[in-house]
Amino acid sequence: MMAEVAVEIPTCETCGADIRGESLFCYSCGSALSPNAEPPTEETDEKPEAEIKKLPPLTSAASLRKKRRAFNRQPVQISWDPPDGSPTAFFVAAIALTIGAAILLVLAMYLR
């Protein structure tokens, strides 16, 4: 006795890959699906033509690549100004960190 197929999943006629629901192109090979191949759906809802929205035609990616990009380049002037005052805060912080590191090193050697 053979098992019956409960759900029949359509396949691509070109490469044989499974077709996802409501796909227009095969995700495996990229070929257009034939109009007679119907994607698996639980219910088929036929909408009247009055309810179907008319979408604008799609533009190709090639036309988007050919468009010139608009560059608004502005000249930028970079200047370096020396800091005001003496760097005493830097020297005080460097000395404090050096003393702290020395204390940690002595404690590490002592507790070893």
Image (tube, rainbow, N blue to C red):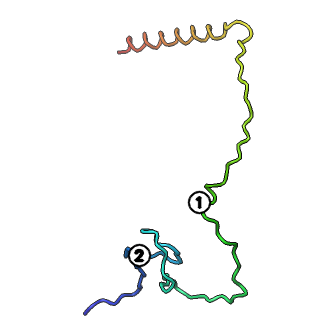
Q: Where is residue 42 in the image (x, y as percent from the top left)?
A: 52, 85
- Residue at the spot 62% in from the left edge and 8% down from the top edge: 92
What crowding class fits label 1: few (fewer than 14 Cα within 10 Å), some (14-19), or many (20 or more)? few
Residue pictured at 55% horizontal, 13% vertical: 97
Residue type at mark 2 is: Asp
Report which quarter residue 85 is drawn in.
top right
Q: Which of 92 and 12 is in front in this view?
A: 12
Q: Return the residue at label 2.
A: 18
Density class for disc 2 (Cα within 10 Å; few <14, some 14-19, many ≥20) is some
Which residue is label 1 attached to? 62
Give the answer, above or below, for where 4 lies relative to 18. Answer: below
Circle 2 — which element? loop
85 or 95, nearer to the observer: 85
Res. 16 image quadrant: bottom left
Q: Name which residue lies at 69% across and 88% down.
A: 49
**3 or 93, which lies in front?**
3
Specify the quadrant that holds the N terminus. bottom left
- Cα distance in 3D space between marks 1 and 2: 29 Å
In x, y percent, where is residue 60? 61, 64
Q: Which amino acid does label 1 sit on?
A: Ala
